[in-house]
Structure formats: C-alpha cells, structure tokens
Amino acid sequence: MVQKNSHYLKIEWGKIVECCGLLSLMGEGSELEKNPSCTVSLAIRNANLKDIKALTDVLTLSFHPSGGWLSFLQPILRLGVSEDLRLRLRGAVPYYCCLVAVETTKTPSETKEKVIGTVEITLKSGFNCHYLYISNLAVLETHRRKGVAKKLLKECERIASQWGYNSLNLHVLENNYAAKKLYLSNGYQICENEILWTNWFWVRSEKLFLKKKI
C-alpha cells in the first residue's frame, strides 16, 4: 500500500480504504469510489519560475494568513513575496536553492500536481566564515504533520553535503513551538538566543539561532 524512500512517497488510498472497509463511508460518488486505483505521491524538486504563483500562495498563507485588521494588506504582501521569489530564482547565485514539495494525485483519467511546501537554502557570510542557512520553510496548513517539512529538511541536508558543507543553520522565534519542536526533533541544537531590538517596543518573541551537524 505504501512505497517509500528518501525522496518519494506513494500511497494507494483506494486499497487502504478497501482493506479497512471504509468505502461505504466515503459517500456515493466520491473520488475513491469512482477511482479505486487513485494514487497520491510526494516528490521534492528544485523550484522553477512556473512555480512562483503556487509558492507565493504557500508562503503568504503560512507567514501572512488572511484575517484581522491587516487583511487589506494581503494583495501588497503577495506582490512583494512574488517579486522577491522571482528575483531569487532568476539570480545566478552559486550557492542558492529553492525546493518545492509537490503532491501528485493520479487517477485513470487525469494527473493533478499541487505545490504544498517549500524551503530555501543559501550560503551566508558571517564573522570570518561562511555557512549554509535555511529559510522560508513552509507547508500548507492542510498538509502539515504529515512529514512534508521533515522531507524538505532532509533534502537540504543532501544538498549541503553535495556542496561540501557539514552543517546547516536557521532561525526560529522562541514562541513558535511547532517549528521549534520540528527542528529539535530533527537534530538541530540551540546555539544562541537573540533579543530583537523591537522587544523594547512591541510584544515580540526572542529569536533562536539553531545549528545541525550533518
């Protein structure tokens, strides 16, 4: 029913539903009832310019969710995210990579692809050193807690090794408990606790600097 390796996950939902006796509960005319051979797979690949719209959706919904009194800024935020992505993807930076997690649903009649997650990895300069930095890790809310973020992080590790580096670094807000749990459970360690200057004026969290040896 499930075929899995480090880059590919294939789930034959039709067989799972049939084996568990759940077909009758899916409702008449459901996709699985019509297409018992329906399969869903997850692949991690490099992003390209055609992904910009889908990537903008993932990043905006993850970091700037709609609702509240700032909703009117959503179109402006989307435009900024889209243009920043376009510049980075068109750039000729040697140590930069934007990854996308793509869910593919196959039925006998059609194949649908959907970008459900993303992450970026780039080389940064520090005091007397260079280091690889992870940013913009985001997964659509409907697909969280399914291992997508973990697979994106694993692919970053593979790329880092390919580039000849043995560590990865990132920041996370101290009160972002879900993200912090994800990183710590995947081997990242807290190296530094940074106080943002805005803490003196706004209610903000401290920022943690994390590192993982690979």
Image (cartoon, rainbow, N blue to C red):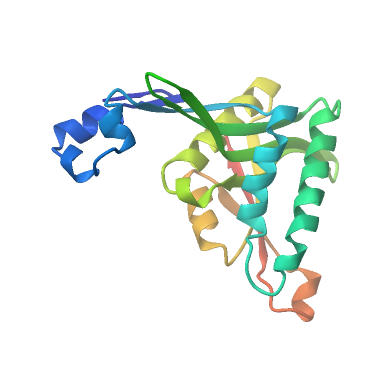
Q: Quadrant of residue 90?
A: top right
Is residue 152 found left or right of 16 in the rendered image? right
Q: Quadrant of residue 192?
A: bottom right
Is residue 11 found left or right of 145 in the rendered image? left
Q: Position of residue 197 (x, y in %)?
A: 80, 71
Residue in view at x 61 percent, y 39 percent: 118
Q: Is residue 110 visible?
A: yes
Q: Is residue 7 visible?
A: no
Q: Is residue 194 above or below residue 4?
A: below
In this rendered view, identify the residue nearer to me: 104 or 132.
Answer: 104
Residue in view at x 67 percent, y 40 percent: 55
Q: Position of residue 195 (x, y in %)?
A: 73, 69
Q: Determine the residue located farthest toward the bottom in the rendered image.
A: 201
In this rendered view, identify the residue nearer to me: 108 or 12.
Answer: 108
Residue in view at x 66 percent, y 48 percent: 59
Is residue 130 found left or right of 53 in the rendered image? right
Q: Position of residue 109 (x, y in %)?
A: 41, 20
Residue in view at x 54 percent, y 47 percent: 140
